[in-house]
Image (tube, rainbow, N blue to C red):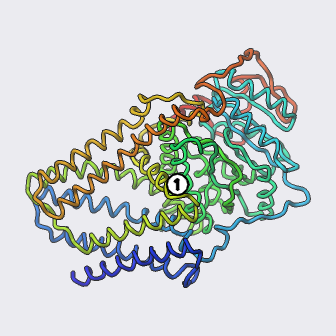
Amino acid sequence: MAAINICLVVLAALHVLAAVIVSIEVFTGRTGLRWNEYSAAGMVLWGSLLGITGTGTVRLFLLLIQLSVDPVTLVLLWVVGILGFVRTVPGLVRQYEGWDCVIRRRWHRGGTILTRPLPPNPPFVTIEVPVHAEPPDIVIATLDHLSQLDYPAFDVLVIDNNTADPALWRPIEDHCERLGPRFRFVHVEGISGAKAGALNWARPLVNPRTALIALVDADYQVDPRWLRDTVGQFDDPDLGFVQSPHAYRDFEHSGFQRMVNAGYQWAQATEMVSRDEKGAGITVGTVSLIRLTALDEVGGWAEWCMTEDSEFAIRVHAAGWQSLFVPRVYGRGLIPQTFSELKKQRYRWTYGPGQEFKRHWRLFVPGPWRRPSRLTRTQRWRHGNYDLVILTVGVGVLSLPISGALLISMAMSGNVPPVIPSVLIGTVAILVARRLIRWAIYRKVIGTDNRTTLGGMIALMAVTPTITGAGLDVLLGRRTSFQRTDKFDQQPSLRRALASARTETGLAICCLTAAILVPILLPPEVGTYLLTLSFVWLTVLHSTALALAIRAEFDLANNPIAVRCGCKSGSVSGKHEGDQRKIQGLGGEELPQGSSRSRLLRSTSNYPGADVRGDADTVEL
């Protein structure tokens, strides 16, 4: 035991020292000593983290084996230990992806903007813009930016699906007519599958000359050089898709949106670059460029999945296609204006990867259970971990009720488990190092100031309960519905802020109550004080949701510039007659408006088995 304790203390000291050195290297731009592809300090940082985690886990389980407490408390402690162990390995992989951008010193392609010149005859690109009940002015601005693309061979296909109010889609149709024959507009009702269903439905409408499909969300405004700078990458015949970062605009006036934007930037600057370095990047559903042959080969878009974009990356890699992430912003969209809309978005982004793991787990596991594919070993564990971490996060829901039960059990028995000083030192070292490295990445890699860095961390904390809840829902197989993010301008509402954060506020009150009761019910020991601090921390974490929700409503009330399109939720001025118009397919045939048209086009789809029933806004999964 003494040797383990000494080892933990030494590793903790090395871990903090390495974190300080790496941070200094990041701020000064000096590379320091190298160890293969990594900095020497970075390898010590990563190695000491593994050492503390492994040694500390062994030490804790040895304590549990020898612990003499009442049976109920012992069982609960074992459950806590096992749950922590289950979440450890996926968490370590995620930590590596977050740190890779500051500990790696040699990049093969990740972290570098790669460009290739256009070939003499550039491939034809069809840009698909799926739309559902969006503010027309926002979509029109998106189309205007697409019309300015500096690329000779492209067309734009606007797919308006399941928008019931003609006042929302008629202005977009009229604007496409004004922009000329390069822009085509289709309206369809009666299809399911949300965005994926709309894209699959529109497959027969794609120009026969098309070699590449580009995806742009309805609110994204793209850089004129987007296609010119990225299409040349497809000279590589094995390349399946090219992805650019998620990025946002028009948030400077709102403190809430600045905080949310800082939270978004973390994954784009760290995890996306790290995954791409090993050929395991994902598509994010906008500013994406995809080889049509690869899309057809893997069967189109997954209508059963909330994140059809990242799910597509799994299947395209499994089919042997390669991918590329270009870390340069070529398009910017809008950030949700309220906390309730932010929660919808983060719920989707969490639930979807959990679905992916449950559907594709046999692609990732080793041994006889693995389904044959062309995924590399690195792609298997990167894709698998990206999805598995969601399910393990869902397990974390149990930690709060188990902690409450443990508190009651210890209060009734009077037994407070002893605290191992070396394990405590190791835990504190990990927390300090993580905060230090995160601060360095935000400040120098992402380029934020201290206030924005803190705001980004708070924004990530505020959605933690939402992410955990989504993980639990997908783990238990609970059916849910696809709820899009509302882009209409919102009016301030304190009631909405309180309602959107009521679950988190309730959890914060429970944690605060527990923090007050712990020193009252338990004897004054080190374990008692640590348990109190843990409940205080959970109180702060859950309280950030209410604070962020109120800040969003405050910004709406005090920043008139937040009005982006002059549209009120659910309607837009200017009614259009509901006449039965017709569109033309690429072969020149006239296609009748409405659900009959959707069935006609679906019958010619390359993706058999797709369903045309339901509502794309509330598709059940």
Q: Which residue is situated farthest in the left direction here?
A: 413
Total numbered badges shown on the rendered structure: 1
Q: Picture quarter containing residue 519? A: bottom left
In x, y percent, where is residue 606? 72, 42
Residue that carries the numbered disc 1 in the rendered image: 360
Q: Image height check: is 199 above or below 391? A: above
Q: Is residue 505 left or right of residue 360?
A: left
* Residue positioned 84% across, 30% down in the render: 178
Quarter in which the N terminus is drawn: bottom left
Closer to us: 272 or 519: 519
Q: Which residue is situated farthest in the right direction here?
A: 120
In x, y percent, where is residue 433? 41, 69
Q: Is residue 599 left or right of residue 28?
A: right
In x, y percent, where is residue 80? 26, 58
Closer to us: 262 or 98: 262
Q: Image height check: is 41 above or below 80? A: below
Q: Secondary structure at mark 1?
A: helix
Q: Image height check: is 41 above or below 179? A: below
Q: Amino acid at mark 1?
A: His
Closer to us: 343 or 357: 343
Q: Is residue 134 left or right of residue 339?
A: right
* Residue positioned 91% across, 59% down in the render: 120
Q: Is residue 61 left or right of residue 262?
A: left
